[in-house]
Amino acid sequence: MQRGKIIESHWELLPHGADIGVRGIGGSKEEAFEQAAVALTAVITDPNSVAAKDEVEVTCDAHDDELLLVDWLNSLIYEMATRRMLFVRFEVHIEDHRLRAKAWGEAIDEHKHDFGVEVKGATCTELKVAQDQEGGWLAQCIVDV
Amino acid sequence: MELSRLQRRAENEWWIAPYGKMRVPAVIYASESLMREMDEKVYEQVTNVAMLPGIVKASYAMPDAHWGYGFPIGGVAAFDAEKGGVISAGGVGFDISCGVRTLLTSLSLAEISAKKDQLADALFHTIPAGVGSRGKLSLNEKEMNAMLTGGAKWAVGHGYGIREDLERVEEEGCIPAARPDEVSDRAKKRQREEMGTLGSGNHYLEVQHVAKIFDEKIAAAFELQQGDVVLSIHCGSRGLGHQIGTEFLTRMAAAAAQYGIELPDRDLACAPIYSPVGEAYLGAMRAAINCALANRQIITHLARQAFSEIFPKAELPLLYDVSHNTCKVEEHQLKGMPVRLFIHRKGATRAFGPGHPAVPEALRALGQPVLIGGTMGTASYVLSGTEKGMELAFGSACHGAGRSMSRHQALRQWRGSEVVQNLAGHGILIRSRSMRGIAEEAPGAYKDVSAVVEAADRAGLARTVARLEPVICIKG
């Protein structure tokens, strides 16, 4: 493993026939989870159109890192649906498959946000949380829309 | 899909003989060209389903099958509870009881033409649609439980629609044995303000005209004539169903391990039908079916209100309401014997043949209406169930066109405003709060619905009755 290499964290959307995949890349598992969450918002609307105004706390836990990613995304989907909010900035802490996070965003505003599609839930399809040889982390799965 | 591994048993019927851990064969109903276009993942998923305990006869895929999670979208599978059969949340899907309902309007295309814009605006303003939209009623805990138990029947009891509507809904508008107590507080909270909303994505409300009749006799019984205007609604159980699907996918993954069920794919998570988790899911899923039926019933009422603003004399009786993401207990014939089976249909429509007691009396001699939703630029279809379909895939047919292009690719290819303009040139009015949503749902991003319907018809799953073309589309 190469150490000290700086991994630029970013997110991607994965093409998938009926649904869509979210992928976060980062220098740590936490960063990859944060970026996957930005990708989740990008499925719904342009993250650049969302302001990080209000803070929401999220906690979840699972048997392994991969199911933790599914749980994390599902927790955000739930918070977005019930608070009618969109999130754009995240701070994730993971310890022994337990996740504590803060998410910042704002209320949904149809005049400000151009919507793609609502996300119904995260799935285990193409689910992967892994570290590559260069030390970078990847966190991805398909979400049902 | 690479076809050399399949055996073609008929023009539109492809078999995969059991190998490895498959307990039964897998059968795909489609034309050769649909098969060639079909995702390789469908092969993998339809064979994975064939490995599940208690599966009966075969694992099926409909002509519009595509890559889902666990089960393919367009998958049908029957399980025998007495033989260790399972129930799977991934075999139903997240949008539990998503479906299509079609209303007749007693108006002709010529009659609505002059007032098309007004009608589009009235529908758009009356029916909440799109990301984050709120319904007009908010349910407290007691009413939420009553709705989850009563379905469309509950909605009619609260003034949304008329009693006659219920005869034209599967399960007469209310599936029994729903268990609101098995629905989590989170699922109920997610639903609280979403009653009577369309949702987003491929969900819509469309005013359509009957463009072509294929079967005069059945069309007459369905009261469809060329040039008639109808209204169709495509939506499901909203946040409640999504949350139940999400929660049980995880609970079933744990249960499968506990019961020693080997899963070739985590999304195939399932539990024995006779197990605490299996029974809990059945109760919760049935509550979600009732939620979807109530939701479509409320939207029906809103659509009638909007219609009456523009056409005060119009009546909008219900032709039929189908659900295409369900697991239902049905009696089917196996080797001449009646057997009680748990039929999973994920992105597949129930299509009961003539004489089936579940078909409304007035239509029973002809078979159940099967409503297939298309895209906002192409067409939708009305089919009817056949006797042969009962044999082929437990009385099931396709559910729609199915995407051929990802949302991402569609966004790169089209602009929402151009799609709207282009459709306006074809006489189709689009109303939506989201231009990006329109681009993602562009008609070109979908497979040819006519080819899917033709394959279903030729395979014998259902008979084509009428083709409906859009006039107004309210998009979520």
Image (spheres, rainbow, N blue to C red):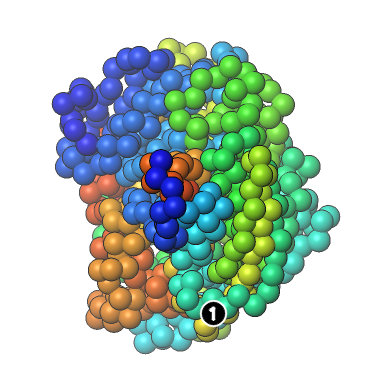
Label 1: few (<14), some or many (≥20) within 10 Å?
Answer: some
In the image, taking residue B173 as reference, residue B140 lies left or right, namely: right
Can residue B292 be seen from the camera position used here? no
Q: Residue furthest right?
A: B142
Where residue A29 sits: x, y (%)? 53, 49
In the image, taking residue B29 as reference, residue B86 lies left or right, namely: right
Amino acid type for the residue under numbered disc 1: Glu
Can residue B184 be seen from the camera position used here? yes
- Counting the numbered discs, the total is 1
Instruction: Give SS at disc 1.
Output: loop
Residue for point 76% across, 51% down: B185
Give the answer, above or below, for where B375 lies relative to B420: above
In the image, taking residue A80 as reference, residue B93 lies left or right, namely: left
Give the answer, above or below, for where A46 lies relative to B410: below
Q: Chain of mark 1?
A: A
Splitting the image into 4 quarters, where does residue B253 fall? Answer: top right
Where residue B217 sits: x, y (%)? 33, 49
Residue for point 34% across, 76% down: B416
Give the answer, above or below, for where B315 lies relative to B15: below
Residue for point 64% across, 53% down: A93
Where residue A114 sits: x, y (%)? 46, 76
Q: Nearer the viewer, residue B60 or B168?
A: B60
Q: Residue furthest front?
A: A4
Residue for point 62% across, 61% down: A91
Give the answer, above or below, for where B277 lies relative to B69: above
Where residue B142 sits: x, y (%)? 83, 55
Image quarter of the N terminus of chain B: top left
Q: Which residue is mark 1?
A: A110
Q: Nearer the viewer, residue B423 or B38?
A: B38
